[in-house]
Amino acid sequence: MRRMICASLIALLAATTASWAVEPVDVSVERDEHKETDKKKENRLGFLRIRRVLKMDNLQIRYEAYVHEEDRTPYHEQYADWFLGCDFGRFHGNGGWNRWDFLNVTITSPEGDSYSVVPSQPLDDFVIVEESDRALADMCWPTPPSGTLCVRVMKLPGDKEWAFLEVGIDGETDSALSSIAISSYPYNTSKTGDQPRQRWVTTLMSEYEMTDQPRDISAADEWALIMHNKLSQEDGGVTLLLDPTEISSLQVYGTYPVYARFTPAEGVKYVHIGMSYFDGERYDAVAERMREEGSAWLKRMRGLDFSAHPAPGPNRQEAEEDIRWLLRFPAIAEEFGQKMQDAQNHEADLTSALQKASDTGVRVDRSLERDLGFARRDLSDLHRAMQRRWLELLPPLAH
């Protein structure tokens, strides 16, 4: 009896301890491509509709675009031909970070021409590059004639209120970041009835009523700010954190969506952005906390390591056991055995190469991290194909 009681107490203690542990970030990417056949969308008939959705706990970033099937160049003639939206801290309808066009990155080519990468360039892809307790994923677009614009997204475990971005151009290129703009709809897109509402930005130093004319503010002193409302809908908005050593100018503007637009400082290749939100708390209380804690926020962001760690995800052992079990069936082994072996060897080679590169202490080429992410995605896709095939074979296997 005493042994049973002790065992029960140990089990209870283990369960309680597990409940206190911080859950790893739940990360996934949804992918879909199909040819538009809806006759109500006659201007888009025959074009490919590309859709990617990155999910990290309560953060969701959605990319949708119509492209020409032949070369995948974007088709952009009217509203809703493309979206790059961020659903993070959404409340009260469509309030929060901009669900349709939250991030705009302008590139200057070697010839001096400037262009907005999204929607002008075809998407390379979304790919998860680290799946440990935290999550890292890349969203990439080419920057002709060479290089790749990469937006790396980071979400930390146990932190629902913050997400972080690293924006830069990877690879050998003479193209450069010209400007970055990020936007939100504080509290909601629309007003409440006939109540007046004003869009405002409050910074570490001051506060500004928004107009549609860009206003210059101090990049050196106003690197943390909140986007919010006055007169109504005052208890919800978003918080933006920038590194003042990485930007040379900063503007705010907008009476419907509110924008912050900033220019990277000379020589800066990667810009880091912290994104948060608040709901059910008045903007002035959030502004007070920002002024008290802003330096700690900045120190934390500066200490983040945006390099992807080569270790596999938390469910890897379970997946490998299932693969070995599935390969015991001759029909599955014959169809998938060599494919799986090749995929595993490719993933192992990339893991080894990335580990060796990481050990040098020099910043690793992001393309290698993405190659490993794609290799692991291919492994997962192949595993799912094996599972589907096993289900198809299940009736004859049961006899």
Image (spheres, helix red, strand yellow):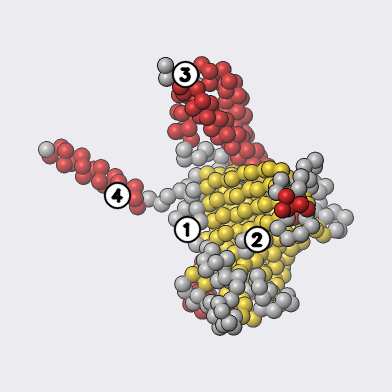
Residue under label 4: 16
Type of the residue with mark 4: Thr
Residue under label 1: 159
Which is in the foreground here, disc 3 or disc 1?
Answer: 3
Measured in 3D between alpha carbons, the distance from the residue under mark 3 to the one under mark 2, in whole angstroms, is 49 Å
Residue under label 3: 396
> Could you tell me which residue is drawn at 49 percent across and 27 percent down?
391
User: Which numbered disc flags the more N-terminal residue, 3 or 1?
Assistant: 1
Q: In the current view of this chain or complex, which residue is farthest to the front? A: 39
Image x and y of residue 73, in percent: 79, 47
* Quadrant showing the C terminus: top left
> Could you tell me which residue is drawn at 66 percent across and 52 percent down?
63
Disc 4 crowd, CA 10 A, few/some/many (<14, 14-19, 20+): few
User: Which numbered disc flags the more N-terminal residue, 4 or 1?
Assistant: 4
User: Which numbered disc flags the more N-terminal residue, 4 or 2?
Assistant: 4
Image x and y of residue 13, in percent: 26, 47
| Secondary structure state at the residue bearing disc 1 | loop
| Secondary structure state at the residue bearing disc 4 | helix
Foreground of the two, 87 or 104: 87
